[in-house]
Amino acid sequence: MADKEISLNRGLQGVYLDRTNTTFIDGKEGVLEYSGYNIHDLAENSNFEETSYLLMYGELPNQKQLDEFDASLKNARVLPQQAYDVIDIVKDSHPMDVLRTTISTLSSFDEDRDDFSEDAIIRKGIRLTSQVPIIVMAHNRMRKGLDPIESSKTLPHAANFLYMLEGEEPSEDTAKLMDTDFVVHADHGCNASAFTTRVVTGTNADFYGSITAGIAALSGPSHGGAAEGVMELAKDVGTPENAAAHVKNLLANRERVMGFGHRVYKAADPRAKHLKDGVKKLSEEKGETAWYEILLAVQEAMTPYARRGIHANVDFFAGAVYYLIGIPQDLFVPIFAVGRIPGWTIQILEQMRHNILIRPLLQYTGERSKEYIPITKRD
Ligand code: CMC
């Protein structure tokens, strides 16, 4: 086909892949809704359990439905021994690699492994929502030679996640902030990892294969890895006074300021506000406001770039939240995955409901019709 007849969309920018009833994003206005509910309402009034139900079933639950859903999540707070064995074998790897490998292993021990029905996918999604935090925290303990801390059977999801760090129940405010972080990370349209889960599901491969691939896509710094980069940036900046010069230097060298910019949002990322408010409060509570002040100074230095649609994204303040809570830096990306399982689950289901093989084209630009020369006659 002639060049001019091909419309090339590198990175599939601006391409609609399918329809969804789950997440609405207006990148120009900075609007995000899950199943029709604004993220600000959910971040302020809902919690991760209710938001997960909303995503998986498309409607807010009544009290009985929420209680049952919550009980299923709590009952699923167990890992097969074989998963701990796998964690132990690969425990020296990056936590995202450990998470990817362990999730892949879980398919072998799932009683619903060969059941591709909607109910079975929801059951797998619920189980994995509860198991991913255990994998992340068990690995964090085991790599230090410590025993994993057994999940609480009563704490809410976010509080239980933090409890498994060192066996201490977090304060109400800290648990609420972690919960808000999970709510704002729960789904985000056709980003790289969700797209990856859809591509794998498109081939009729199984749930665990799709999530394993999604985890791999999430691990890169352009996607989930930015929160880790933001704390590195804050440490490099050192003091608020250095922020403007540091940012100027990065931009002059055409380097990326981590935690800024987004493929879809050209207005402020609506998720960032909730974590920014949380960092401010947590910093003040802990009497450790230096990181917040550095981040504010970096944000100030980036103000001129807002005109070009480059704003702080969800990851900009997320790293400081985790850091102030005392979570090791290499767990920042896995935390993103902890919050994202409900979103990936519903996207896999949506893809399955009217499945189609996802198979775009590549425009060939190499030489053609070359003569094959036997190896003995090549220079
Ligand atoms: N710092 C400096 N310049 C930037 C940044 C940034 N963080 N982001 C975009 N730009 C500039 C970029 O240099 C380019 O300029 P020019 O047109 O002069 O070449 C322009 O903005 C467009 O950038 P792009 O890379 O073509 O835009 P994209 O849509 O492909 O990239 C992005 C989106 C998120 C990969 C990018 O903004 C980035 O690398 N940000 C830093 C990493 C980051 O924070 N990632 C987390 C994203 S939010 C979590 C999630 O939902 O995954």
Image (cartoon, grey):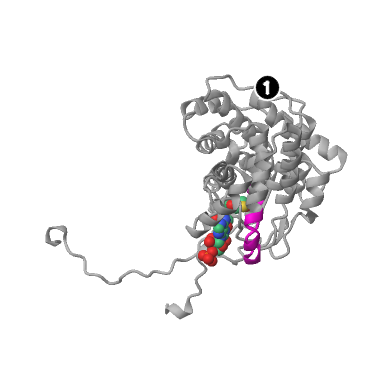
Image coordinates for residue 62, horizontal then vertical, percent: 86, 43
Image coordinates for residue 198, horizontal then vertical, percent: 58, 53
Q: Quadrant of ligand 1?
A: bottom right
Q: Residues within 10 Å of mark 1 (few under 14, many from 20)?
A: some
Name the foreground residue: 239 vs 49. Answer: 239
Residue 314: within the magenta?
yes
Q: Can you see residue 266?
A: yes
Residue 142: within the magenta?
no
Q: Quadrant of the N terminus?
A: bottom left
Residue placed at 47% from the left, 33% from the top? 93
Tell me the kind of residue under disc 1: Gly
Residue placed at 16% from the left, 58% from the top? 375
Say above or below: 181 vs 366: above
Q: Residue furthest left?
A: 376
Residue placed at 68% from the left, 33% from the top? 325
Residue 26 horizontal side relative to residue 237, left or right: right
Q: Secondary structure at mark 1?
A: loop
Q: Residue furthest front?
A: 241
Magenta range is 300-315
For residue 109, which quarter of the picture? Answer: top right
Residue 349 horizontal side relative to residue 252, left or right: right
Say above or below: 58 vs 286: below
Image coordinates for residue 73, horizontal then vertical, percent: 72, 34
For residue 163, which quarter of the picture? Answer: top right
Residue placed at 79% from the left, 51% from the top? 40
Q: Can you see residue 344?
A: no
Residue at which label 1 appears: 167
- The kind of secondary structure the magenta stretch mainly shows is helix
For residue 179, which quarter of the picture? Answer: top right
Q: Quadrant of the C terminus?
A: bottom left
